[in-house]
Image (tube, helix red, strand yellow):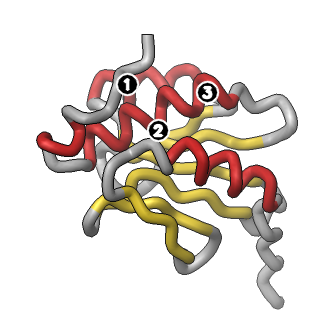
Amino acid sequence: MPSASRPEVPADWVERLAQICAAFPECREEDAWVGVRWRVRSATVAHVFGGEDQLFRITFRASPDEVMAFEHMGAPYFRTEWGSNVVGMLLDDDTDWDELAELLTDSYCIQAPSRLAEQVPQPN
């Protein structure tokens, strides 16, 4: 049985994510094994991709307390099966992009060296 194809992430969503991540020092966009990811040095800050179920997801890093909270909140959040600090969010037309920007800021600050993280203004 052939596997389902993965949809391309809408270009305007990738652009919005790129604008968010452009504010982070030394954060760069690159093609991932599927979708697009943003990294600081060798650490992944965010990874957006389409799934075989035709849904779009973004994964990012969170503190241990936040990982548990996201896991219990349920949709649109989920915990991944890899990495103790990796969580994700389903993306759709109702995504709260301001909230996502805050989550990605936190993810960057977790992944970046402290001297870079200190340069990022924290959301209020």
Picture quarter containing residue 93?
Answer: top right
Q: Residue at x 57, y 20 (%)?
A: 73
Q: Which numbered mark, 2 or 1, is in the foreground of this view?
A: 2
Q: Secondary structure at mark 3?
A: loop
Answer with left or right where residue 61 lies relative to residue 92: left
Tell me the residue that label 2 is attached to.
104
Q: Which mark is residue 74?
A: 3
Picture quarter containing residue 64?
Answer: top left
* Quarter of the picture holding the N terminus: bottom right
Q: Residue at x 50, y 66 (%)?
A: 29
| Cα–Cα span, label 3 and label 1 | 13 Å
Labels 3 & 1 near each other (Cβ < 8 A): no
Q: Residue at x 66, y 51 (%)?
A: 57
Labels 2 and 1: the sequence-earlier one: 1
Label 3 crowd bin: few (<14), some (14–19), many (20+), radius 10 Å: few
Labels 3 and 1: the sequence-earlier one: 1
| Cα–Cα span, label 3 and label 2 | 19 Å
Q: Secondary structure at mark 1?
A: helix
Residue 32, position in %: x, y?
Answer: 53, 75
Tell me the residue that label 1 is attached to.
66
Answer with left or right where residue 97 lies relative to residue 4: left
Depth check: 39 or 8 in front?
39
Q: Is residue 77 above or below residue 88?
A: above
